[in-house]
Image (spheres, grey):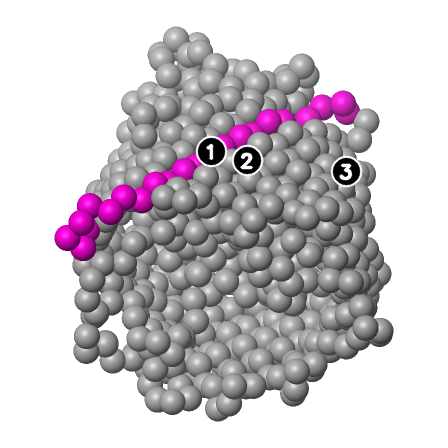
Amino acid sequence: MRLLKTAILCATALSPLPALAADAGEGAEQRTIIVTGALEEGSTATKTDTPIIETPQPITVIDDELYLAQGAISIGDTLNYVSGVTANPYGPDSRVDGAFVRGINALQFRDGMRDIFSFYASIRADPYNFDQVELVRGPASVLFGQGALGGIINLVSKRPEFEAGGEVSVRYGSFNRKEALVDVTGPLGDTVAARIVARVRDADTQTDYVPDDRVMVSPSITFQPSSDTELTLIGLYQEDDGGSTSQFLPLVGTILPNPNGQLPNSQFVGKPGWDRYDGRLLQGTALLEHRFNESARINLKARYIDSDLTYLTHYPNSYSNPTNPYLDAGQRLIGLYVDGTIARMEIFSTDNNVQLDFNTGSAVEHTLLAGLDYSANKVHKTRGLAVEAIDIYNIDYDALSGYGGGLPTPTSVSEDVDQDQLGIYVQDQIRFFDRVSIVLGARRDWTSAQSKGGATRKDAATTFRAGIIGEAVKGVSPFFSYTESFEPIAGTASDGSAFVPKSGRQFEAGIKFHPADNILATVTAYHIKENNRPVSDDSTVDPTDQIQIGYMTSKGIEFEGNVSLPGDLTIIANASYNEAEVAGTGHQIDNVPKFNASLWTTKGFSLGNETTLLLGGGVRHVGKNRSFGRAFPDGLVTPSFTLVDALAEVTHGSWSFALNATNLFDKRYYSACLARGDCFVGSERNVMGTVSYRF
């Protein structure tokens, strides 16, 4: 096994860089922002090339042209304009990408295989490294095994192309952001193509003393000895030198009044130079596709991930007494936790399936998929804790200890978990008279998890999926589905015991409207029940401690509409309503708004002389949310907020200049304020100018 992992990683790291095209081409190409059409193929929901209008489940495909035009600088940002999603629910978190889908944390996959298994054990994925982001709402466990109930986010890596092309860009923006980006692809011969994607960034953030520096290089190579066989190897080296933009500021001094005034959004409560979130990530991926004939094909995937992370941080003790956490009558002096972790994570995963296409009669078509996947992950964390105190309104940074640049002492192993999962699955997609589609699926999973000092926990589960969609009249396709989930969770509860796997089920019904290929609108209603959900353990002062509850429900309605109109006009409109409650409480889950809505549009103009102009803009609204706890039995309200984004891009020949602005009017807001005692600052205005040369 170790030899296989090493071979994959080394082979992808040796991918050569293709020569630049000798001729960049003539004339200007009209820049077009792509929205999902009715005939778009989305392989994540079914692991087959099935059109969205034939899939009984809501699917959103966000092309990289679209999310980069919307100013996305993180994976979380790519979901800003997607129905049913609360992107970055804890603000601009430089440590992890987050999204609530139907009120539930979504799991992140890359090329169909999960790549995040533990909090604060790895660095964030780079959106520039992907062709598209796919969101499948609802459970996907029948095919993926580890899919969360709300949905999964699948990142589709850029792959080599046999047509030479690419771009080189430089960027400058808010918070002294300086970047260089490269994406070059092309053939190395008749049967070999290569690609390299790279980013170098030197930047600050909206939080004082917190950098956001990155080096990312992803080489890839494709071997295509025949039209029926394709092997792609993808390597990735990424190094981030940063910190935590989340400072866990106390409620009293942010959303609640303090006689000394409101703490600034840029407030930093740590030790400059000591606090950091530094990581190194190595990945090697192999993707093999082979078609035996017109009706049989095989797909094999494997990936190895090696991640090292150093996370050193401070955060105020707002948890012992959320309504007055200060140690003095003047409400300035506050306790300060010092928390340091060194984490190592290793992941090996593979997914292998065979697809058979056949008919059982002249009007009944089958696409049968059968597969086996396996994943093994190991997470080891060493942690040190200490306590200090500061005047949060006039911090003496020099007085804080630097602990010799290392962990506070004493240190201990805080997490040592080995987890593996083996699953077998089968799915049959049945198409009747090219009008009605039925999807039936089943899966069996076996998992084991062993935590430090504990016995090995073994679990097994069988999950099912069934759905139907049919074109009742031209352009109108009602659908209904039933899906189940089974999600093993790495990590331990606050008492040291290993987490029990989550499980759940969902009923969903909706209608997809597709009167033309350039129009797709979906309306859907759903009801989810989830068991064994981890939540914050309010009986301890450590905000990272968690316990598991009995079950929760999430139900709601979603609308999503995409249209491309004549005159190079595109419109994306979304709205969703969600009620997510822990059973027996009658309370909405912390930090989950009931209502979200967004609208994004772009318009292209031809200015003549090989020059075009693309203008775009959007409005996104996130509803208010509540958080409940001992100090706030009636709930603490985080107000709703509405943000405006904008885009302007001029293209002349092979050159372009783009200006992106998110939160254009610099709305100051809090993304979340929790009853446990802390607040999370929302994203401030971010403006970026990018000059690109495309060939």
Q: Depth-wise, is mark 2 or mark 3 nearer the camera?
A: 2
Q: In which quarter of the image is the C terminus?
A: bottom left
Q: What whole-number distance in Å separates the C-alpha atoms at marks 1 and 2?
A: 6 Å
Label 1 is placed on what type of residue? Answer: Leu
What element does badge 1 sit on? Answer: strand
* Mark number displayed over residue 599: 1
Residue 346 position, x and y percent, is 55, 67
- The answer to whether residue 545 of the structure is visible from this angle is no
Q: Quadrant of residue 683?
A: top left
Residue 178 position, x and y percent, is 22, 50
Q: Mark 3 points at which residue?
A: 527
What element does badge 2 sit on? Answer: strand
Q: Quadrant of the N terminus?
A: bottom right
| In the depicted structure, whether residue 491 falls above or below residue 291 | above
Circles 1 and 2: CB distance less than 8 Å? yes
* Mark number displayed over residue 574: 2
Q: Earlier in the sequence, mark 3 or mark 1?
A: 3
Decide whether residue 126 is among the magenta residues.
no
Circles 3 and 1: CB distance less than 8 Å? no
Q: Which of marks 1 and 2 is nearer the N terminus?
A: 2
Q: Give the range drawn in magenta.
A: 585-611
Query: Residue most toward the front?
Result: 474
